[in-house]
Image: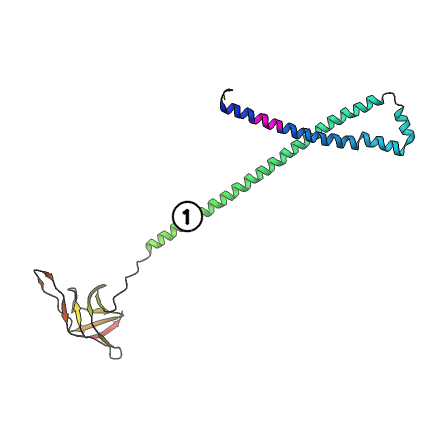
Amino acid sequence: MSPNSGRWRRYTGRHRTDMLQDFRTYVDLLQGHWLAFMSAGPFLIDRLVTWLWPWGRRQLDNLPHRRQLFLWLIIAGVFWSGFASWREQQHRAVLLADERNSAITERDAAKAEASDKQRKIDQLEGRIAVLEAARPLTAPARDPDGLYQLGAMVGSVGPTRIDLARGIVEFSGVRSAGKLNPNADIEYRDLVLRCEGLPTPPIAGFMGTVSSVSTGARCVIVRER
């Protein structure tokens, strides 16, 4: 990475910013630890001796190197406070790293769980699509006045009289579209019938096939469809 490149300048700028933030944090911690050390150390001992041990107070005042001893205590306090500040800063960094690693682990686990759920959803959707494609198509609704042979409508009827007790069905009129076979059974609604008087197949002429009509037909119920 070239020293003149934009990436290098961004890296060095970010590094200086992080270093200044660490230094400010260290100074704040150092002040707190130094005040705590000095307050709970030399100053507290000096006050206790003054209040509770007057003879000891006089002996301390008469020490020839009292000022040097006090100075060395301050220096020791600075070093101890610096070490405690550095140790606390490292401890905070370790805690932050642990929390970050824990969050990353939880995130990866959540992503893996979501991926498994999505894969199951895709599998179920594929299975549903296969079952939908294999499902037989529903037959179209039949005309209640239609006559059917081989699953196709081959004619229609007019007013009808159904006598289930005698097993007879009578049509007042039957119209064939040219496909009706009068010699075969026909299907009418839920019944299979064998009829007499159905129209005969039409005659094909130059103008195409014409329909045929009978004025009535009498049928015997063979069975239910």
Q: Main secondary structure of the magenta part?
A: helix
Marker count (numbered): 1
Q: Is residue 166 magenta?
A: no
Q: Residue furthest right?
A: 55
Q: Which residues are magenta?
A: 14-20
On the question of residue 191 being in view, the answer is yes
Callout 1: few (<14), some (14-19), or many (20+) C-alpha neighbours within 10 Å? few
What amino acid is at disc 1?
Asp
Q: Residue furthest left?
A: 206
Q: Nearer the viewer, residue 106 or 194?
A: 106
Q: Nearer the viewer, residue 116 or 145?
A: 145
State which quadrant residue 49 falls in.
top right
- Measuring from the top left, give residue 36's x and y in whole percent: 75, 32
Quick one: SS at disc 1? helix
State which quadrant residue 164 falls in.
bottom left
Q: What residue is drawn where x is 83% and y is 22%?
A: 67
- Measuring from the top left, give residue 127's x and y in whole percent: 38, 51
On the question of residue 150 being in view, the answer is no
In the image, is residue 28 above or below residue 139?
above
Left or right of 163 on screen, residue 2: right
Q: What residue is drawn where x is 41% and y is 48%?
A: 122
Quadrant placement of the C terminus = bottom left
Q: Nearer the viewer, residue 126 or 31?
A: 31
In the image, is residue 222 above or below residue 133?
below
Task: Name the colour scheme.
Answer: rainbow
- Measuring from the top left, give residue 222's x and y in whole percent: 23, 73
Determine which residue is flagged by label 1: 122
- Measuring from the top left, give residue 133's x and y in whole percent: 33, 53
State which quadrant residue 59 falls in.
top right
